[in-house]
Image (cartoon, grey):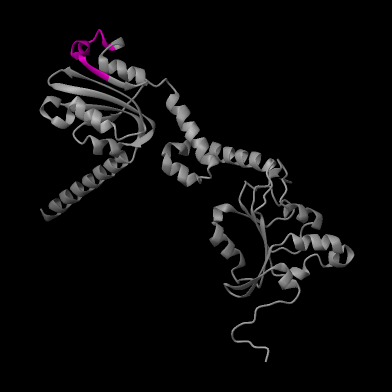
Amino acid sequence: MACSVIVSALCHNIRKAVFQIKKDNYNNRRNRKYQLTFNNPDKHKKTSHQSIKETLKQWENLIYWCMADEIAKTLHTHLFIQFKNPIYFSSIKKAFPTAHIEEAQGTAKENKLYIIKEGKWAETEKGTTNLKDTYEEWGTIPEQGQGKRNDLMNLYQMIKDGYSNVEILENNPDNILNLQHIDKARLEILSNQYKSERRLNLVVTYVSGKTGYGKSRHILDSHGDANVYRVTDYKHAFDTYNGEDVIVFEEYRSDLPIGNMLNYLDVYPLQLPARYNNRQACYNFVYIVSNWKLEDQYFNIKNEQPETYQAWLRRIHKVRVYTAPNTWNEYQPHDYLYGFHPVNDMETPF
């Protein structure tokens, strides 16, 4: 007997939990079009036509609505609403708590015909229940496909404004079906921008120190992993570059010809060589990370091609030297190369 009671209670709790999950999921859904039904509007002040119209004014995003009364078993009001952008079901429910609310199917015109019981509804039993004198509408009825065009325009603008994929999905979860296209569009927009735009804010930092001191980790923590492109294969350095704002040349030991490196560290528009398709340089931060000191890079070039070597040094804006795990000093290149180094608190020259 006790077992039966426990099982019954457990089943009840499971059903309750499942119902709550379904309810939460529905409340979190978004749509552009809704059909609402208000039963017995003559008995409730807040469901009169005037009250409904006042409530609808809160949404600047609203582009069209129509409504009419009809009598079946009871008097009720049908309302169709359409928004420019998708809106949460929970927002509609909060505004109209007593209404029966459904995501509207079909076009705006089809929903209007249902409200006024015309078209295919005219010759049905429902065609006789409509109170035509109560019909009201506001706005211009949207054309079929207009909502989808608005969605695409909003999506394009978010990509241009630099929204991440996660931020785009939070704005409209339906975009999960477009992720592959979003990535391609983002890369195309960035590539087109930087084909003719100099990256005048480009910052190049040389980072040196022992293995395990946190050189790369600090860069990733500062910029976010998704924004950093790490070069680890110097034979095919840019094959998977995807427009990231940050490039890190890892474990660098004069791995690339200095002429190429001078181009990669310059502000001018540049196509990065890749096996399948060259990639447009879109980065504004470069980190050259190495166990070698700056002066050890391109050591032979220093003596054989001093002007080229000086051009290499001029490309570097900061020198960061790790002295212990997660501890570093940062210098201007001139100060680093020509002997100015900060003295630790525990050290004195006397």
| Residue 200 magenta-highlighted | no
Q: Look at 52% across and 36% down and name the residue there.
A: 156
Q: Quadrant of residue 350?
A: bottom right
Q: Quadrant of residue 322?
A: bottom right
Give coordinates of residue 341: x percent, y percent. Answer: 68, 77
Q: Is residue 236 left or right of residue 118?
A: right
| Residue 134 magenta-highlighted | yes
What is the magenta range? 121-136
- The tally of labels here is 0
Answer whether residue 79 is visible to the viewer in this image.
yes
Q: Look at 58% across and 74% down and name the residue there.
A: 325
Q: Is residue 39 left or right of residue 308?
A: left
Q: Look at 86% across and 64% down and name the residue there.
A: 306
284 lies above or below 347:
above
199 lies above or below 125:
below
Q: Is residue 225 left or right of residue 266?
A: left
Q: Look at 30% across and 40% down and name the residue there.
A: 27
Residue extending farthest top:
123
110 lies above or below 96:
above
104 lies above or below 11:
above
